[in-house]
Image (cartoon, coloured by chain):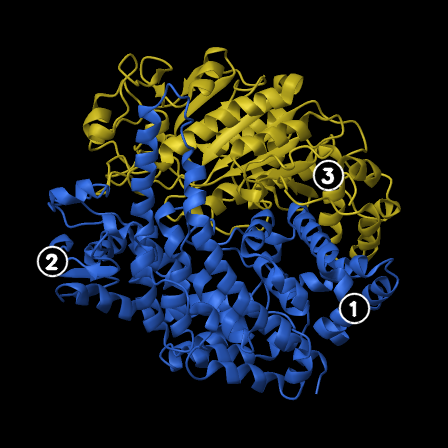
Chain colours: A blue, B yellow
Amino acid sequence: MNPLDAVIAVNRFGLGAAPGEIATAAHDPRGWLLAQLRGPAPDYPQLSGLDGSEELVKEFPRWLMKLRAERRGAEDAPAQGTPQPGVEASFAKHFLPIAAKEIGARFGIAATTAAPFHERLTWFWANHFSVSADKPAVFAVAGAFEREAIRPNVNGRFVDLLLAAVKHPAMILYLDNHLSVAPGFRAPEAAGRANLPRATGLNENLAREILELHTVGVNGGYTQADVTMFARAITGWTVGGLTDTGFRFAPRRHESGPKAVLGRVYAQEGMAQGEAILRDLAAQTSTAHHIATRLVRHFVADDPPPAVVDRVAHAFVDSGGDLPVVHAALVGSPEAWAQPLAKLKQPIEFVASALRAVPPAREARPEALFLALREMGQRPFFPPSPQGWPDTAVAWADADGLWKRIEWSSALAERVGARVDPLAVAESAYGPALSGATRLAIARAESRQQGLALVLASPEFQKR
Amino acid sequence: MTNRRDTLKTLGGLAVLSALPGLGLAQGASSERRLVFVFLRGGLDGLAAVPAYGDPDLARRRGDLATAAPGEVNGALALDGTFALHPLLPEMHKLYRSGEAAVLHAVATPYRDRSHFDAQNVLENGTAKPYGRDAGWLNVALAQAAQRSGGVALGASVPLVLRGPAPVTSWSPSVMPSPDPDLLDRLGRLYRDDPLLAKPFAAALETEALMEGQGTRDGGRSGRGAPVAVLAQAAGRLLSQPDGPRVATIDFGGWDTHANQAGELGPLARNLRQLDRATATLKASLGPAWRHTVVLVVTEFGRTVAINGSRGTDHGTAAAAFALGGAVRGGRVIAQWPGLGDRDLHEGRDLRPTLDLRALLKAALAAQLGTSEAALETQVFPDSRGVPPLEGLFA
């Protein structure tokens, strides 16, 4: 057996080697991965104390009311010179503690899970269905989105993942579908008081991104008319207010009547119409190809080899979008095992792998991880667009990105370096993939701290 | 840990630097001319930023979301008898009045569909097709520049427009302490032979030395999500240095205003305020170099002429663009206005493009990087002979 296979299994497919993990996987690297594709999602204790989206979705209207009260207070007392509280500062104060809990759970799992391939797939699919706190109302529910819509469906069927993602409040709010209504719809007076923007017609944002990003892809053969019709079909897919929370279908906001999308006419009434369209989109061969391309880019190479994409797309079509079968096709592709360290880690992967490789590093506070990732260009819950974080080296291997990784490595090593043996860390993380130059540099380091900084900032540790 | 400033002073003396493929910033005579490319990602609503208040159809189309006309309460800032600037762009208006800003309208790339990502890709890669090339027109032009120029990306990672054969660097503020020079020296030996990381590492060292520790621990948000004024400040600092780069890109996202765009706390107001502040900051930070600078402010597409069902606008086609700087012959609006009547609109919904954005980009490259017309129409923007550079816009 190739000794590099275990290195690839734990670094490329997993989240980076924890001490002893390469040895565990070495008996049967492929089997070690495939075992993580079976059964329900692991039941992580880190997730037990977190609120659900039906509760968290209330945080944004709560904050708006608080902000209004703060501002009113400021207007009432100009003589005392009360400074007007900054909107951004007030936002951060309200939402950062919520985000910190989610980040603590997310990286707590990443640092210790025995099913890191499953966890990486969770991250991959959360990025495929990106929601971003660039829309402030999304911040509080972005973590819940991953927990509720993505995580339970990673070992399930793509169509169920798609339906769960689109029907989640985070997605509805991010892509404005709560503001997309049938022509002529008049909101009741109460909506104005709840500070919801008035909705008087169609908003095509969600429909377009489902077609372009989540399913058939930009070359999937749809037209502007398909976007508009699909958007009309999912009018009424919305979220509740302060009391009636979570995703809901609001019949009065929905435009009834048949809709034609991608050459098929949908005559269903109510929510069934949008669901039927989503089911058909999930089954398109263009969807299989689009998904396969993104998966192969993530697991094999920045330039996805067409033969692997075809193989994974076939697995998608033949299995009816059964994700474990699709994911197993990646594991079964020889191209994925041909070259170690072929992919540059994204910052979240870099940080997660450091936490796995260096147990004392797991003491890091979630707030500190949030700041570090922001510095490295991957602020948690703020992907730059519905397209998600980029997944190629060219997007991450720039001067500033690398500099921030070195800064973080150095600071982390100063803090915990005295407690670890840097050469042992490097050996257990990369084993036979460690270069002679790196091994020598670590051995010659002037201190344990400097040695650990060299491990974490080394070229090998940036890659998987 | 050492003081950041002292650390960075010693960076230039690191033995490993001579073995690394750097930016070559200190070699050869540097050009006086600077070019800054500000990319408003998400699709700027040109009709909100630059309302055509002289067109009677505007108020009809935009209803109560129309910006008040010049002279009214919170009214737009008049440019001429037809066009005005959004009231939250007073600094830009000042530049316009002093002849240092030109406003372009009804501008678009050759892309005619409505995907952000494809549209941004077309704007950046310089061909007329999404994913037509893995390099950006700005980098291709840099690689051919007769005088050494050097490029730096502020904010996001190096955007496609600045990727390609010419080595470039990137920078954003940091709250983390600077690494020890001895560590950097040792790391340099490891990166030296790494095909992916050798160049970025060398570029980072050079850039940190140029910044001399400025812009760190600024108290505000740092990293790549730093406020755009902070990035503008750094761009000015780097470009104004004798050994600094001559081209900068500033990535500024968040212009995809599908909902509630006119609100006081809405995304459009927030972004316009930031853009205006960044404009003034950049000018101040460039100092005397502003005289030789062109700043292009562009977006991937405009937005629908009509308001959508949630008091926002959806993806459209033509938009507005800006050319700012001491090297701009400004004080005018460049627009062949297509009108907003029912039959004037592109596909019945968008502002119709009457000017190819590449005409502006080409003119800026010719003026600031000395790019030849032959290179512009074959290599920088392949197959673009039919789109001549705008004439007389840059001094």
Residue that mark 1 sits on:
A421
Q: Is residue B34 left or right of residue B328?
A: right
Q: Residue B280 location in percent, x, y?
A: 53, 21
Q: Is residue B308 left or right of residue A360?
A: left
Residue in view at x 75 percent, y 62 percent: A455
**For the residue marked with disc 2, what is the amino acid?**
Ser
Residue in view at x 43 percent, y 84 percent: A39
Q: Chain of mark 2?
A: A
- Camera-nearest residue between B379 and B262: B262
Residue that mark 3 sits on:
B208
Q: Is residue A368 above or below residue A331?
A: above
Q: Residues within 10 Å of mark 2 (few under 14, many from 20)?
A: some
Q: Residue A340 location in percent, x, y?
A: 68, 72
Q: Quadrant of residue B320?
A: top left
User: On residue A457, which mark appears?
Assistant: none
Residue in view at x 75 percent, y 72 percent: A433
**For the residue marked with disc 3, what is the amino acid?**
Glu
Same-chain check, marks 3 and 1: no
Q: Chain of mark 3?
A: B
Q: Chain of mark 1?
A: A
